[in-house]
């Protein structure tokens, strides 16, 4: 059996190398590639992705997995080997279920949809995007149908991002959350908002960069195993456990946007950098799911980076970087300004209190479209109605409404809820961390993050993708994903800021 | 036949994509990769290189080539298709002749040799390097022997870099050249050397960068299809015809070293950027050989970049970049300083007049080692003897002598002569260009390079690797590689500078 396992690992290593190489092609495309490289790059990416797919869905991998499955049942079910076999088998089953024609048609349709969406958004013309979006939802429905039987046709889509999670679970979580979040926002809206004009002055890009580097170096980001580059849409990309790079964008008309983005991406990177080296070059050498990943980026960005203890240490430092902008602003004013709650049309600009509501409306709409209870042509109306209900605002244009996100144009259906689930998990982990590290806030107040990072590595990071997200959360917090810690977090934080 | 040809091209396209991806892995390793990525990167490179090799040496490619060879004989022998089939068949034959075990052993030995060489060089300890170097020459001898019969056992090694070229050809060329170069250097050594201390002041790196960008932009380097980055050892890397990037290093204690390096690499890049798009993603989408490539880098660096007409335009501009360093130095002083002839121990620091002699001694030594007429243990003595004979200097240490170059430690035997051949070809092409563009010098004097670049594209660049180097040179200049134009060039240039 050991020789079969070695054979499987060798194949998976090679596939990992090909995927890591493709990741570098993508990273380079977003950072340094001259525009002339576009066509060649798309060929290179497509060739590597096809190679990896063919190698993974080969009979050789299938046979090895069949032979190894009984062995996985005999050994410690939590061992790396047992998990590797089971997780890989699950990927294999999903990958081989889909006919090549459907894969190709979906790839072509989403490639075609992306520029159409860009134009529709630029021209505020939803009708232009409608036909190709209908096709995308149709193809995703056909994809999901391949995995019948299921409790809900949305399950297989969600499962691509959150293995094992069911639509009903997410609906129940969001059902419990929504009225509480709406009530909180309404309570806040009755208070006088803090002043935040000083955030929107000119802040030199290089100084923002330097301050951000200061901060994430203190977090424990290891520059010998990563780097930071500029990119128009910030992202984190790993090429193995020991090379995980972040990218950031620093708008000069905002003093903190780039900084929070840096902390967010560093949170993603710290997760991947913390995976056990025993899992290197295997499919387990990644985060457990997008929601778990987001729990890490949001934790460093928000629970750490938007907290008062954090700024007790870092605000005086930031003032020395930007004396003209912040010299006369005190810590209390600054802290309140960066935690301003204000409903916006745009998800990516939303604050912690309103963010999840943007997600809920997207999830409800996706489910209705996949079920067939909503037609694509009725999307703008359904969107705007929910914006009014949940956030109390109505987008004046579809560009600021239903056309704002790139995801659907890329065929990413089932993705959005991972953002909100990440918020919930971050607060849930935070309560567990507080139990284990009672003086966590005092540590943060002195920019001491090593116990926090150590805790995350020990309890979460090192396991990589060995456990499904619900199981991972259960193992750490003794509960499945639960919205209440996040509500407690919001109520405490905003209760103090707004005097509720 | 068309369908067979399409099948072959599809396979070659995929192999090209894999090789281009590997090239990006290598580029990134030399430019941006954090040190933690080293181990993962070596796996990624090895996986992609193995994939490309297996795909290329497959029975599928072999059978298609066998079926297509008669077809190639029926169509226009200069057509892209005929050349593609023949050149690919030649590669295929060479690639499949070598047993996998020998490939693996050679790869392992050269991987092992590189750090040993680094240590030996650092410690001036040739004896440390000797055993692994013996093994490398032994393995290269076994490799060459696989291609018997041949005129000379060195032929197959040379052929890896200069397809079709024979050892006897190169020996005849160098035999004719050596006494003339030695005589020229001796004549120069009797003159008073120009003053060049002002070159060795502090020159700000960013200003050097900016001036270099000015220059190669005027050459015609297209920044939408390339870019420049810093690297400790400058190189040019293409990822397809429309993305060819250069790297440069700007030592701040030298005002021109980085600049000439930029021009040199831009010359390589202009060659690859000029290949006909009909050859894209095929094995012909590269330069014809290393010597042809070097003819382009040397032409832009030396025949253009170290010429008086070039500096008549650019020297006043350079003075505005560096008024403190160059404000009181006139054009004549500057021109003579950058063309100082002075024998050095180190090849990469050699001037145009002495450079080829460094190559000749390496070629003679390589041939003697491969033949067995020289033992590796006697290398330092053989090296120093020739240095004395050809250049009149004796390296005080092996670090400054036989241990200076990286090539042998990487198993690159047969490579060195391409540098000297590139010099010769550059001057040979230059005479042809002068015949076709009689006012070339006046154009250069006004920084007008478009006719020159157009000529190179039309006569050389667009053909890519369709023709073997001797054939390529013959087609352009109506003569095979000939040392006399280079000697005429040196004699005219240095005759004027040194008043010979």
Image (cartoon, coloured by chain):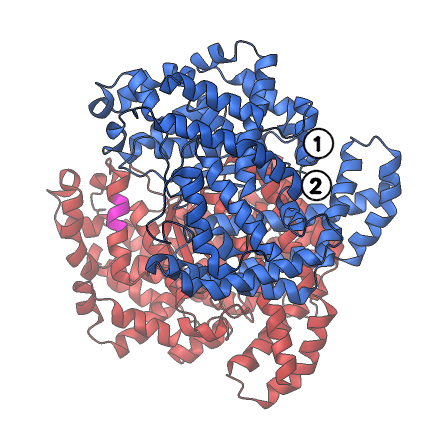
Chain colours: A blue, B red
Say above or below: A381 vs A492.
below
Which residue is pictured at 32% across the width and 46% down the height?
Answer: B258
Disc 1: host chain: A
- Residue picked out by circle 2: A164
Secondary element at tag 1: helix
Q: Which of marks 1 and 2 is nearer the N terminus?
A: 2
**Residue B173 % position (x, y):** 46, 67
Residues under numbered marks 1 and 2 in contact, where contact means CB atoms less than 8 Å apart: yes
Are the residues under badges 1 and 2 in a single subunit?
Answer: yes
- Residue picked out by circle 1: A471
Q: Residues within 10 Å of mark 1 (few under 14, many from 20)?
A: some
Disc 2: host chain: A
- Report the span colored magenta: B208-212
Q: Residues within 10 Å of mark 2 (few under 14, many from 20)?
A: some
Say above or below: A10 vs B88.
above
**Residue B312 % position (x, y):** 15, 58
> Mark number for residue B65?
none
Q: How far apart are marks 1 and 2 (CA)?
A: 9 Å
Closest to the observer: A85 or A360?
Answer: A360
Secondary element at tag 2: loop
Closest to the observer: B498 or B94?
Answer: B94
Main SS, magenta region, reads: helix
Which quadrant would residue B254 be assigned to in this image? Answer: top left
Quadrant in the picture for the C terminus of chain B = bottom left
């Amino acid at each position: 059996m050991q020789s079969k396992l070695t054979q499987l690992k060798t194949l998976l290593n090679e596939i990992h190398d090909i995927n890591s190489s493709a990741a570098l092609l993508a990273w380079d495309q977003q950072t340094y590639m001259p525009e002339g490289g576009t066509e060649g790059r798309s060929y290179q990416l497509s060739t590597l992705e096809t190679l990896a797919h063919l190698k993974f869905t080969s009979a050789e991998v299938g046979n090895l997995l069949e032979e190894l499955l009984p062995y996985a049942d005999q050994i410690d079910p939590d061992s790396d080997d047992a998990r590797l076999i089971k997780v890989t088998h699950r990927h294999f089953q999903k990958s081989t279920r889909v006919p090549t024609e459907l894969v190709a048609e979906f790839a072509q349709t989403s490639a075609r949809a992306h520029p159409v969406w860009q134009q529709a958004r630029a021209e505020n013309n939803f009708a232009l995007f409608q036909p190709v979006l209908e096709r995308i939802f149709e193809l995703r429905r056909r994809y999901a149908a391949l995995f019948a039987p299921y409790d809900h046709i949305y399950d297989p889509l969600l499962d691509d991002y959150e293995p094992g999670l069911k639509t009903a679970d997410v609906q129940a979580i969001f059902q419990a959350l929504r009225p509480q979040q709406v009530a909180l926002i309404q309570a806040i809206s009755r208070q006088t908002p803090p002043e935040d004009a000083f955030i929107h002055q000119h802040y030199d890009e290089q100084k923002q960069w330097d301050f951000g580097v200061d901060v994430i170096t203190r977090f424990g980001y290891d520059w010998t195993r990563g780097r930071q580059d500029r990119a128009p849409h910030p992202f984190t990309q790993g090429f193995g456990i020991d090379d995980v790079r972040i990218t950031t964008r620093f708008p000069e008309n905002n003093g903190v946007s780039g900084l929070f983005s840096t902390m967010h991406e560093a949170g993603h990177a710290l997760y991947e950098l913390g995976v056990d080296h025993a899992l290197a070059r295997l499919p387990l050498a990644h985060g457990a799911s997008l929601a778990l990943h987001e729990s890490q980026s949001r934790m460093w960005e928000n629970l750490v980076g938007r907290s008062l203890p954090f700024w007790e240490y870092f605000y005086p430092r930031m003032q020395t970087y930007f004396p003209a902008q912040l010299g006369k602003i005190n810590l209390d004013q600054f802290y309140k300004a960066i935690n301003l709650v204000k409903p916006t049309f745009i998800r990516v600009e939303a604050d912690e209190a309103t963010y999840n509501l943007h997600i809920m409306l997207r999830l409800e709409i996706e489910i209705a479209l996949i079920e067939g209870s909503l037609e694509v042509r009725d999307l703008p109306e359904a969107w705007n109605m929910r914006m009014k209900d949940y956030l109390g605002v109505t987008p004046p244009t579809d560009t600021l409404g239903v056309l704002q996100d790139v995801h659907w144009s890329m065929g990413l259906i089932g993705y959005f809820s991972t953002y909100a689930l990440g918020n919930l998990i971050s607060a849930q982990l935070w309560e567990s961390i507080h139990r284990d590290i009672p003086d966590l806030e005092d540590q943060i107040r002195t920019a001491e993050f090593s116990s926090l990072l150590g805790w995350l590595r020990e309890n979460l990071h090192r396991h990589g993708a060995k456990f499904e997200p619900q199981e991972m959360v259960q193992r750490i917090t003794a509960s499945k994903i639960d919205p209440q810690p996040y509500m407690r977090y919001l109520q405490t934080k905003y209760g103090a800021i707004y005097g509720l």
